Image (spheres, grey):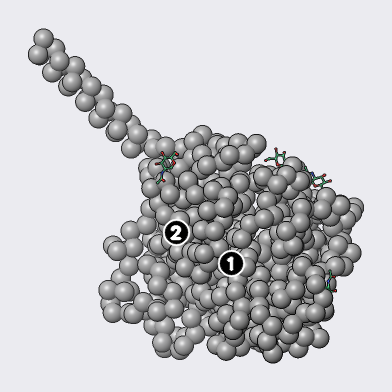
Amino acid sequence: MQSLVRKLALAASALLALTLVFYLAVGPTGEGTGHHLPEWRWSGNFWKGGKMPYDFPSDVGYPGPTQKGPPSQLAQEDTVSQSGAVKKPWNPLPLEIALPDAQSQYGNFEPFLHMGPLTPYAASSGFGIDDGKYGRMPDGCIIEQVHYLSRHGSRYPTSGSPANLIRDLLGQSPRPVFSGPLSFLNAYRYRLGKELLVPVGRQQLYDEGVSAIISYGNLIYEDIATFGTLFARAGSQHRIVESARNWLAGALGVGGTWENSSTLEIQIEADGFNTTLAPNFACPNAGKAGWEVGNAWKEEWINDYAKAAVERLQPYVKGVTLTPKLINALQQVCSYDTVAGFDSTALCSLFTKEEWLGYEYAWDLEFYGGYGSGSSVGPAQGVGWLNEMLARLEGQAWDPRLQTSENSTFDAHPRTFPVDRRFYVDFTHDSVIANVLAALDLPAFARELPVHRPDPQRMYRTSQLVPFGARLIVEKLQCQASSRFPAVTSNNVTEGRFIRMKLNDALLPLDSLSACASEKRKDGVCSMDAFLKSYEGRMERVKWERCFEK
Ligand SMILES: *[C@@H]1O[C@H](CO)[C@@H](O)[C@H](O)[C@H]1NC(C)=O
Ligand SMILES: *[C@@H]1O[C@H](CO)[C@@H](O)[C@H](O)[C@H]1NC(C)=O
Ligand SMILES: *[C@@H]1O[C@H](CO)[C@@H](O)[C@H](O)[C@H]1NC(C)=O
Ligand SMILES: *[C@@H]1O[C@H](CO)[C@@H](O)[C@H](O)[C@H]1NC(C)=O
């Protein structure tokens, strides 16, 4: 009997070991990458959500295409920080963002702060308001309500990224031969997955949640006390949901706490579905040449700025003709390798300060002309979120006559589109924040970008607008009458209410809105009445119908 038990136990553990070996060899789902970390948690194609006491299931699916990459081991790979280079204080990320000869090569210039939407989160240096003077809460005001729109954290390249050009180039047979400053490419391995949040992206969103609960904890806990949960929304793509979960964990705590104290409403991002968190899916002309000009402008500019690098580096490559496009793609791989936790110093050091500024401007042109005011369908895609924000700001049900990219199934229902909260948080993409900024119609971000002549004073700098972990925050203030906040004599609901907005920790110049200008404020604040008045004509201005024109 005893020996039978022992035999069974032996057989069982052998089976277990076999299963484990098999599991490690084959791994969980993943596009044949052969890597084995079950770090991305979803059940089949369906999300397992938190508490969702709603008519809609939390298992909505539609995570988008994704592909895992191998884990990084920077402690082993990185030789730079061990040689004494100091990690930069501006961004305490555990990444290799110190280049070996940075001082002699770049002086005080920081390439990693100029990587457009691939810039790891860093506070903006400002949008024309004196943040040092006006950043703190004005005397006599309290924050009554907050609308918080966050981008996801650092991720792998998207499916159609130019980074694929480098993967394909290095996969060519025979492999191109590199020499001189490019010699490192002979042994270089392309290791990037696709679309997924990378570990540092989790950190960015967790930290962001921590900073949100420190900044706005009273409002958030008041919602939890009154309604049972904090109300949050996210697009269904994998990295967006992961970002939301990490933000909520940072804000509310792990171990079941955030799941129990928040409601995460996941909205489907896929063709034919409406959601203001990915309005392109409801706008058929989004991304089409002829309706947006960002891609064409970007390509023209890449031909300008990357020409010198082609000439400089071509002598060190046999088997490939370098092009400006490939130079830009190499710069993108530098950005992506860095946030994935690979040692990218050899690749990143290849480029000059002017080339990093050129790279940044290529992103600016792509975003301004593709999603911003330079696109004929850019503002139209941002107005859905703006409509929702204004409804929540006024505490009024969403108006179905304004229908653009909103999903009316959610928005017509107070349980799935509540308008009585203190704090709202939504998770989305860089392109959507660019859309919303275009719909907000701030002149500083509407000014045209000349394709061949970057203006170093421009406000439209994607590194400052939509870095990984970007956040747009609308604060509704209630202020006692004072010389800075003159009393409103009428008895209407917005009396004593003011609006203040921040993008990446810097105040936005609301005084530049049409109806706010007469208040002549230098602190970026605008009375709620004038703020609302500035947007009365928004539907005529943004022209949603252009999404459907032939
Ligand atoms: C979360 O809610 C469940 C169900 O009510 C409960 O069993 C669990 O203890 C809660 N967890 C925390 C951390 O509050
Ligand atoms: C709106 O959202 C609901 C819930 O996810 C979904 O069932 C419905 O198909 C969506 N409708 C549109 C037009 O996107
Ligand atoms: C989705 O958006 C389209 C275009 O604005 C609109 O015609 C349709 O009614 C919307 N459907 C839902 C369910 O929101
Ligand atoms: C509220 O009062 C302000 C100041 O008198 C006025 O300008 C505004 O038009 C009023 N708004 C409404 C909706 O009555």
Determine crowd level at label 2: few under 14, some 14-19, many 20+ residues with C-alpha closer than 10 A. many
Residue pointed to by mark 1: 471
Q: Quick one: SS at disc 2? A: helix
Badge 1 amino acid: Arg
Task: Work out whether residue 452 or residue 48 is closer to the camera in this orientation and state it.
Answer: 48
Q: Quadrant of the N terminus?
A: top left
Q: Residue at x 70, y 47 (%)?
A: 414
* Direction from residue 115 to residue 127 in the image, left or right: right
Q: Which mark is first along the chain, 1 or 2?
A: 2
Q: Is residue 474 visible?
A: yes
User: Ligand 1: does it lie within 8 Å of the C-beta at label 2?
Assistant: no
Q: Residue at x 61, y 88 (%)?
A: 130
Q: Residue at x 57, y 73 (%)?
A: 504
Q: Position of residue 258 (x, y in %)?
A: 46, 50
* Direction from residue 24 to residue 158 in the image, left or right: right
| C-alpha separation, residue under disc 2 versus residue under disc 1 | 15 Å
* Direction from residue 492 to residue 165 in the image, left or right: left
Q: Position of residue 321 (x, y in %)?
A: 58, 66
Residue 250 is marked as 2
Q: Does 510 sit above or below residue 286?
A: below
Q: Is residue 357 visible?
A: no
